[in-house]
Amino acid sequence: MNFPGIGTAANAVAIIVGTLLGVIIRKGLPEKIEKIMMDGVGLCVVVIGMQMAFKSMNMVICIGSIVIGGVIGEILDVNGAFNRLGEWAGEKLAGGDKTAGARIADGFVTASLLFCPGAMAVVGSIQDGLIGDPATLYAKSMLDGITSIIFTANLGWGVALSAFSVGVYQGVITLFAGFFEPLATPAVLAEITSTGGVMILGIGLNLLQVTKIKIANLMPAMIPAVILAYFLG
């Protein structure tokens, strides 16, 4: 018998297991191999972000959401808060080593921003909370677990900390599934996916060192995306 939240728990465990496998794979890799792997991952993340971004039914909503969310995120300094949390955890786990702490924070922030946005997280959490069906989150768990292996091989084991972000994000949606269900219309899901895709595209560009966008400051964009899509979609 399934209980509400089991899908999110499986997702968090998959990320941790993927990270452990990534740590094993990473040992002994030459720097040039890590570099080409990172470039390859960055390119794939860009493509994934573009595919998601084009799911929008109304790009004006996506653009408006990103702009509004970016302003809110910059005022609240969401990116700084994420980095401070990651660096604090990283330094604690790295015995006070600031360089190691910064690397752990980078893995935590990047993976969190990749695993949280998207329709699978929202729909899967609502299904898990309302009818106890974790199938969508199980599928997401497999994808996130595989991605964790690849990311850990390049960014280090800070990726494991993103399991906490996923647990909180999806856990809240699961807990309040009854409230979120009416909002999960096709238009809303399309704009959530599109807005999340723009952020993921930004992550890919950052991984390729093309840009240095404060992606976390765009995370509040998910809220206006839901509101605008629900009333205008």
Image (cartoon, rainbow, N blue to C red):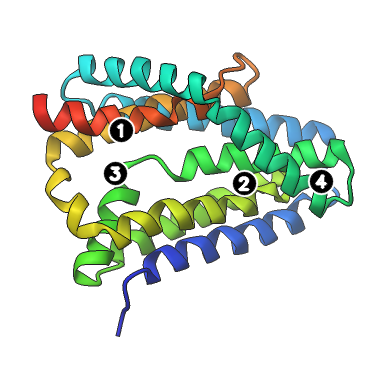
Indicate which disc, 4 or 3, sits on the residue closer to the N terminus.
4
Amino acid type at image mark 4: Glu
Camera-side mark, 4 or 3: 4
Q: Which residue is mark 2?
A: 150
Q: Give how far across and how far down residue 216 sits, in percent.
A: 52, 30
Question: How far apart are the two marked residues, 2 and 1, measured between alpha carbons?
Answer: 30 Å
Quadrant where the image shows the C terminus: top left
**Rendered residue at 39%/24% (across/down):** 198
The outermost residue toward the front is: 76
Quick one: 185 or 231, which is closer to the camera? 231
Mark nearer the viewer, 2 or 4: 4
In this picture, residue 175 sits left or right of residue 75: left
Which label sits on residue 223?
1
Q: How many other residues sit within 10 Å of disc 1, few (<14), some (14-19) or many (≥20)?
A: some
Q: Which mark is residue 206?
A: none
Q: Report helix, strand or loop for mark 4.
A: helix
Q: CA distance from mark 2 to mark 3?
A: 22 Å
Horizontal side of 92 relative to 198 (left or right) equals: right
